Image (cartoon, helix red, strand yellow):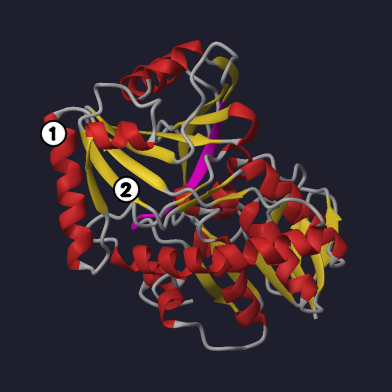
Amino acid sequence: MRVAVVGGGVIGTSVAWRAATAGYRVSLIDPEPASGASFVAGGMLAPVAEAWPGEEDLLELGAVSLRRWPEFAAELERASGLPSGLRTEGTLVVGVDSADRAELDNLADYLATLGRVVTRHSGRELRRLEPSLGPAVRGGLEVPGDLAVDNRVALAALRAAATAAGAEHVLARARAVRAGAVELEDSVLECDVAVIAAGAHSGELHPLLRGAVRPVKGEILRLRARSTALPPPSRTVRGPVHGRQVYLVPRDDGGLVLGATQYEVGFDTEVTVGGVRDLIADAEQVMPGIAEYQLVEAIAGLRPGTGDNLPLLGPLEPGVIAATGHHRNGFLLAPVTADAVLGMLRGETPQDEVKAADPGRHNGGQQ
């Protein structure tokens, strides 16, 4: 069976690796692999820290995928011969003003109703855990089970693993996907099954995805600690600052990813002065020492959003599978998505947590 995977980000490359390893003839189609939202991402694997009332299906799907990440990373390292970039130090969710701390209390209470316990800490206790946190941090939660991954390290390993497994890389832009074929700019690639994993651009490829996936712009900054600065935290630090979400995700060698803004502005990927200003101002409330850091990069990407924040994961028609709409959870959901698509290729019944992401929910169950 020949499988064409459209999209060379974390989802598409994970699917291509798993499918090629399972013996399928795989073509991975992308004109610029690993250059979109996956290249920009912070790499948080944090379903508990990002939980929100009304999104219980997303939390369950994320929790299932999180449990698979350690083995996914180990297999990736064996298959590629490269590091996976996985970090296991956990997450701190911190608050600055009284409204922020009330939001964290509500989060802790909500998680408790779901049987997911987090540890509450005072500001002083948080600073003992992470000395780089500033005095404005008055309280927060420790989420030891959440993970993180260096997105660019993981992408390099995934691409190498897919290549080693026999996946063919097609450096071309897909114009449309239909049963039995992917229409490219100047040719047609025939296949038995096509998998649409093109992120925010997926809606352009199939009629049933039009309007179901939208671009959500996010700007991030990549920083590095200078010799005169405090080192970055060992854990991911995130939380509301006067109501705006900010996160700081450590990287090896003193690196730190600071993000992320969120705008509904179509396919605009230009970094704005206002976005950079807000990110730095909020991050300084949490970690004042970043003022001494080197600004390495400012970049924006387009998250593939859906109406309910769940991905679109399942068949659109015979021979066409959607694996898109992961919004801010592409890296988190890569293991469960790749496993689900492989199961669909084999004709297996999707697991219960995957059924909630069936793309048919947006059109009355009709494919």
Between 56 and 24, the residue placed more toward the observer is: 56
Type of amino acid under label 1: Ala
For the point 71% across and 70% down, the residue is: 18
Q: Answer with the quarter of the image where residue 5 lies.
A: bottom right
Q: Answer with the quarter of the image where residue 298 lies.
A: top right
Give the magenta range.
299-308
Residue 151 visible in the snapshot = yes
Which secondary structure is most common in the magenta stretch? strand
Which residue bears the numbered disc 2? 142
Q: Residue 241: give x, y in percent of width and height.
A: 26, 28
Q: Secondary structure at mark 1?
A: helix
Type of amino acid under label 2: Glu
For the point 82% across and 56% down, the residue is: 81
Residue 245 visible in the snapshot = no
- Left or right: 135 as drawn, with respect to 61: left
- Left or right: 234 as drawn, with respect to 114: right
For the point 48% across and 20% down, the residue is: 230
Q: Residue 159: give x, y in percent of width and height.
A: 77, 53
Closer mark to the observer between disc 2 and disc 1? 2
329 above or below 24? above
Which residue bears the numbered disc 1? 99
Residue 332 lies within the magenta run: no
- Left or right: 194 as drawn, with respect to 54: right
Between 269 and 131, the residue placed more toward the observer is: 131
Q: Secondary structure at mark 2?
A: strand
Q: Are marks 2 and 1 in contact (CB under 8 Å)?
A: no
Q: Residue 130: give x, y in percent of width and height.
A: 39, 33
